Image (cartoon, rainbow, N blue to C red):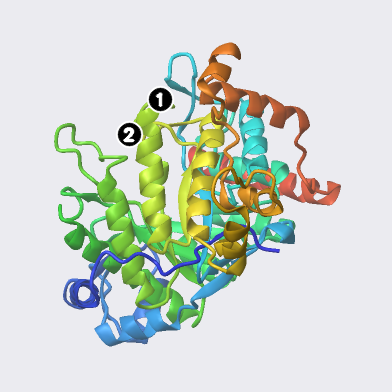
Amino acid sequence: MTKGFTRNFKPFEVLEEGQIEGIWAGALSVLEETGLLFEVEEPKALKILDDGGCTVDYDARRVKFPSHLVEECLRQCPDSFRLEARDPENDLVVGGNRVYIRPGPGRQFLNLETFEGREPTRKEFYEAVTVYDALDNLHVFHSNSPCFSFQGVNPAMANIETYVARARNSTKVNWFAELFRNHMFIIEITRVLGARGHFSIGSASPLAWSDAAITALMAAVEAGIPASLGGGSVWGASAPATIAGEMITNLAEAAGPIVLVQLMDPGHPVMARDYTFPQNMRTGAPFFGNIANGLAAAVLNQCWRKYGIPSCNIEAAVPNSKMMDFQSAYEKGMNALAMAISGAHIVWLHGTVAGELTAHPIQAILDDDIAGMVGRFLQGVEVSDETLAVDLIKKVGPLPGHYLSTGHTREWWRREQFIPKAADLSTLSQWQKEGKKTCLDYARERMEEILATHKVARPLTPSQEEEIERILAEAREYHRKREEG
């Protein structure tokens, strides 16, 4: 059984078909005439691209891609694929009208008293994973969620240790990214778990890819693991300041490695992702939470839909607000809805508070209500004899008739409404009598309830724990030698 939401209407489109064609023409021209920098240490990737028909300067590590080859490879990508969790009940089928929600990153754990960041304890990290596992509208984990790491962990081991923490405390799909050349250990752990997951790899904007990213990408392809690729630019700094211009660099940065993937394994599943933001010209920092992020994501989704390639939007997860407040809610909610209705297959949302600097499970509980509202909107409106209720309307008639006691109301009110779990739904008089509780109060109560009652559906077996500990020991020794060398 797959989980998630289904968009029951045509994706919202920002641009006309001719405008999409113009953006793609620009991206193909950049790939063919300027190309991408592949800063690889070994020539293996360059040789594959050379043999496949690209123009390769081995000394400069510059690759130029013929337009016909790029389009041929993009059309080879499947329009849907399966992400495998260690519990098949949580497998996800990416593509079509399915929409999944996943958490955002958090470099540190938010202190709820000072709203400053600090490194979480191991216990806090494991509890946060438990909360995320219990949330109905969070469907997949990411390598930097709930936080980048926890106390007592070598920074070079962070994405391995956190991957294991998520595997121990959740059966949802576990997404991972390349950091510190740990892909070989993570791939080995996926085999122990029996879960393919997903590999996320980002560019070094503008128009460049690092050796670590390309090495990890090739390893993922060889292991049969789906991959997402995309840009990470800041508009006006490492990409043009316009949405149309940054879209060209974004598409070019993703399409080049997709050619490499398809030359290695035609039909290998990929997803296009982006992690781009406008630059705040007052501060020089990325402008998190800007509605332009949702607009650009809508254009990106429409561009990749031309080739039937699933897309992933990241920016809704990353608000500019430093607190769990009104600003955070509108920055996240408006962008998440724009992304979901415009065709995104995965939307990042839960947990992040300030940029990607802090995160907290209480924020994730609040975000789960945003996700549920987005999911209800995607469900759309059912129009049938039963929902039109013409016979019922005639039967009830004018006043003093009413619908409260009808079977139709009892059956349909829950199906038509979304009921949030961490919101104040009382009347004003009730709210005053019951202590004037806020959504933060309800979220704290829900977190306490989850930690007291929720258990992972399928704990790791003793043999899996033994194998994972062996891999962790091997990884720790590997990084110890690298640091000494």
183 lies above or below 111: below
Q: Position of residue 460 (x, y in %)?
A: 79, 47
Tell me if 14 is positioned left or right of 480 in this view. left
The kind of secondary structure element at disc 1 is loop
As shown in the figure, which amino acid type bears the numbered disc 2? Asn
In three-dimensional space, the C-alpha distance between marks 2 and 1, rounded to whole angstroms, equals 9 Å
Judge whether residue 181 can be spotted in this image.
no
* Residue that mark 2 sits on: 320
Nearer the observer, 281 or 182:
281
Q: State whether residue 118 is above or below residue 477.
A: above
Name the one closer to the observer, 480 or 82: 82
Q: Which amino acid, by three-letter code, is at mark 1?
A: Met
Which quadrant of the view contains residue 358?
Answer: top left
Q: Within 10 Å of the Cα at label 1, are there few (<14), some (14-19), or many (20+) other Cα atoms?
A: many
| Residue neighbourhood size for the residue with mark 2, other residues' Cα within 10 Å, grouped as few (<14), some (14–19), many (≥20) | some
Specify the label residue 323 is tagged with.
1
Horizontal side of residue 96 vs 229, given as left or right: right
User: Would residue 347 be found to the left or right of residue 457 on screen?
Assistant: left
The image shows residue 437 at horizontal and vertical percentages of 55, 18
Residue drawn at 48 percent across, 14 percent down: 113
| Label 2: element kind | loop
Image-based side of 219 in relation to 263, left or right: right
- Dividing the picture into quadrants, the one containing residue 58 is bottom left
